């Protein structure tokens, strides 16, 4: 079997297992074999005129979902195009009243946990409370077997990669693993583990059968 077919079969099998586990925990889960199909899911679940926002995410960039939200029939809180630091702060706060907040995850596990690490905490604050719905778009490469493995992935892979992407002066850029630094440029101030969606269906997972993000 060609490599592409092997990866496709494996990623979809893993996504179906994740769907089974997380639906038991109150999440609404969609399986999208490709990024094109992930965008179709977004168009299906987000109504016209909904107020939408997002947290920092390479997955949303690579999947085209951020562009879809910008050009679609939605009202958008777009901090990336803010004209000043004051406008960014305003958008951060208005995000808590949006209808749909989009983000990805640093890792999720087959035993039913989602792991996210944040620097400032605005992304995780919106995950925990505020927006009516949270939509997480996650590539199959972020799925780990256990919570411990998901934590390790978030801490020792996703965080150093994001520190490099953001050009932060942190030890992990040199060592490529977390050094538990306490410097002002650390992007690892908050770690959140999500094991249930409350209310049921508030958090929606779109599992994509492609590698996306870090």
Image: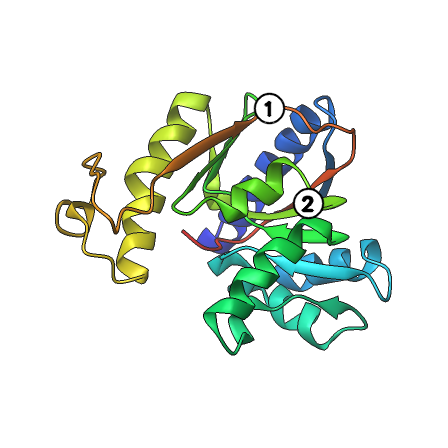
Q: Residue 206 — which label? A: none
Number of residues whose C-alpha sits closer than 10 Å to that of mark 1, classed few (under 14), some (14–19) or many (20 or more): some
* Rendered location of residue 149, percent (x, y): 38, 26
Taking depth in this image into account, of 138 and 160 the one nearest to the observer is 160
Which one is earlier in the sequence, the residue at label 1 or at label 2? 2
As drawn, 47 above or below 181: below
Q: In which quarter of the image is residue 92?
A: bottom right
* Rendered location of residue 168, percent (x, y): 24, 57
* Rendered location of residue 59, percent (x, y): 52, 57
As drawn, 56 above or below 135: below
- Residue at the location (54% across, 76% down)? 81
As drawn, 89 above or below 84: above
* Rendered location of residue 60, percent (x, y): 56, 60
From where the camera sits, is residue 33 visible?
no
Q: Mark 1 points at which residue?
A: 195
Which secondary structure, mark 1?
Answer: loop
Q: Mark 2 points at which residue?
A: 134
From where the camera sits, is residue 99 visible?
yes
């Amino acid at each position: 079997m060609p490599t592409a077919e092997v990866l496709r079969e494996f990623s979809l099998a893993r996504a179906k297992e994740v769907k089974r586990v997380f639906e038991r925990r109150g999440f609404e889960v969609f399986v999208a074999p490709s990024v094109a199909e992930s965008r179709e899911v977004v168009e299906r679940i987000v109504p016209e005129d909904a107020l939408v926002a997002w947290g920092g995410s390479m997955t949303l960039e690579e999947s085209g979902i951020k562009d879809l939200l910008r050009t679609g029939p939605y009202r958008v809180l777009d901090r990336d195009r803010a004209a000043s630091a004051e406008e960014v702060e305003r958008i951060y706060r208005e995000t808590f009243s949006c209808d749909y907040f989009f983000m990805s995850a640093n890792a999720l596990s087959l035993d039913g946990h989602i792991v996210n690490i944040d620097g400032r905490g605005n992304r995780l604050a919106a995950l925990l409370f505020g927006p009516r719905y949270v939509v997480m778009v996650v590539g199959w490469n972020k799925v780990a077997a256990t919570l411990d493995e998901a934590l390790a992935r978030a801490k020792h892979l996703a965080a150093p990669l994001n520190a490099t992407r953001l050009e932060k002066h942190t030890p992990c850029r040199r060592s490529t693993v977390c050094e538990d630094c306490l410097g002002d440029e650390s992007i690892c101030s908050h770690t959140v583990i999500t094991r249930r969606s409350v209310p049921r269906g508030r958090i929606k997972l779109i599992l994509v059968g492609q590698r996306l993000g870090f």
